[in-house]
Image (tube, rainbow, N blue to C red):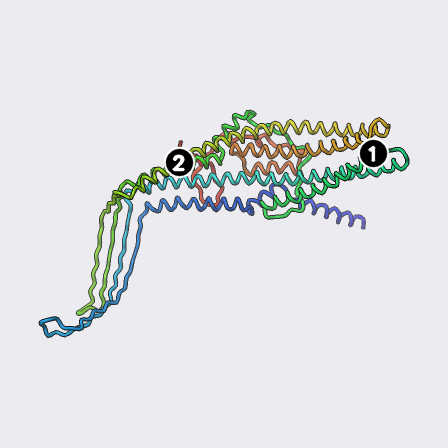
Amino acid sequence: MKKILFGVLTSLVFMNSAYADDLLQVYQQALSNDPIIQAAQATRDANEEGLDQSVAALLPNIGATANSTSVHTSTPFSAPGTSTRGSTTSFNQHDYTLTLTQPIFNFQDWMQVRASNDSAKQAQATYNAALQDLIIRVSTAYFNVLNAEDNLTYTMAQESSIENQLKQTKDRYQVGLGTMTDVYQAQAQYDGLVASVIAAKNTVINNMEALRQITGRTYAELTPLAKNIPLLTPDPASPEDWIAAGEKNNWTLWAARYASLAAKENIRVNYAGHFPTVNAVGSYQNGNDVGVAPSNQTQWESQVGVQVSLPLFQGGAVVSKTRQAQDQYVAASDQMESARRQVVLQAEQAFNNVMADISKIQADKIAVTSSVSALDSTQAGYKAGTKTLLDVLTAEQNVYLSKTNLASDQYNYINSTLSLKEASGSLAGTDVAAINHWLSDPSVEQPQAVIKTHKKSKKIKRVTKHHHPKHVKPKQ
């Protein structure tokens, strides 16, 4: 019976741990359920249709029309000077027409293809940036939950410790070994922690809701971070190298560049309104009159030619649209420069944050050891009468504060690492998998590639919808 009971309990523990979702699972759920990334994908697909539409303007345009008309002609009176009476004629008229138009020269449509191509690449780059932003949002929300749970755990542990301390202080006061001041101090500390526990619980709930907003799911348990995680310094170890990588590969910056190129092409599109257009046109028409005496009449006609159209004056609309396109290009260029500066700032700050977080984590570990030793010494001194209760309460608070700082700085280190890779344009789902390994097996350190930039920039072409993109680089 004991073996059976032990087996059941073991199974329950295993099932409970199996239901804990980790970072990689949450990220995969967000890929399928996050409304922001779904909207970004739909926007990309919609914008890419503009390229197909602009190409369609250069292809043949074929149309067919058919008419069927019933004709009734009546002459009620005879013609003057004749003895002929009025007459009535009825017949059915059927016409079929087939037309073909093939653009030969249309500079505006050709420029529109180039502008649409840049816009399609901009949409793809924007979607790539949204994918990377999803990783940042999921990671931040996930570790915010863990951070809140850690804070709740330490606060509740401190509350329990102070509660025991309060009970002992009251007992000491009852037997004359303590003072009422000690009781008041312990009571005040305990009451403050009760409020802190309530606030910590509320923070956990709110952070869980923030994660649910991304994935559309609620989580009973999340896999916690290991106590010891590898602290990897960025490689290369220079912020200038990361800034250079960001200026070369950052997807938000590429989206701004493509938007600037599309705006530049749009100037030519509007200026081409002054140019003539040349089309090859052809038509075939077949007509059949049924019921016409003495017999049915059939006619057919075919035409082939070249049509030249030259706009002479359009009320100044072409000139105005060209000036408008020039202003839009200036705005797009300024936005591209703003995006470049933002990438430089993000890379610089993220690099500094990673280095600072590593130093803080190392200092936090020392602080935890020191605060625990200080608490033991203070408790011994309190028993010996050389330390006050306030000293003990302060020492206990320092222990939990140092542990809370250590946990918080570890989460900040991970988020700073991901932010650095996002700035350089190299952030991918493989980074989520690497960080996820720190949740399950802390004994195995990750390779340096976790915080490396891309050494080479890949070139890609426009891809089919719903497939992951590669790098797209425009001509300078």
Percent across and percent down for residue 120 are 42, 41
- Relative placement, left or right, of 159 versus 306 is right
- Residue at screen point 57% across, 44% down: 30
Sequence-first tag of 2 and 1: 1
Q: Name the residue under label 2.
A: 329
Element class at badge 2: helix
Label 1: how many Cα within 10 Å (few below 14, some 14–19, many 20+): some
- Relative placement, left or right, of 259 versus 195 is left
Label 2: how many Cα within 10 Å (few below 14, some 14–19, many 20+): many
Element class at badge 1: helix
Percent across and percent down for residue 42 are 48, 46
Three-letter amino acid code at disc 2? Tyr
Q: Mark 1 points at which residue?
A: 182
Q: Marks 2/1: CA distance?
A: 72 Å
Nearer-the-camera pick, 164 or 352: 164
The dot on residue 134 is none
Nearer-the-camera pick, 219 or 321: 321
The residue positioned farthest toward the right in the image shown: 175
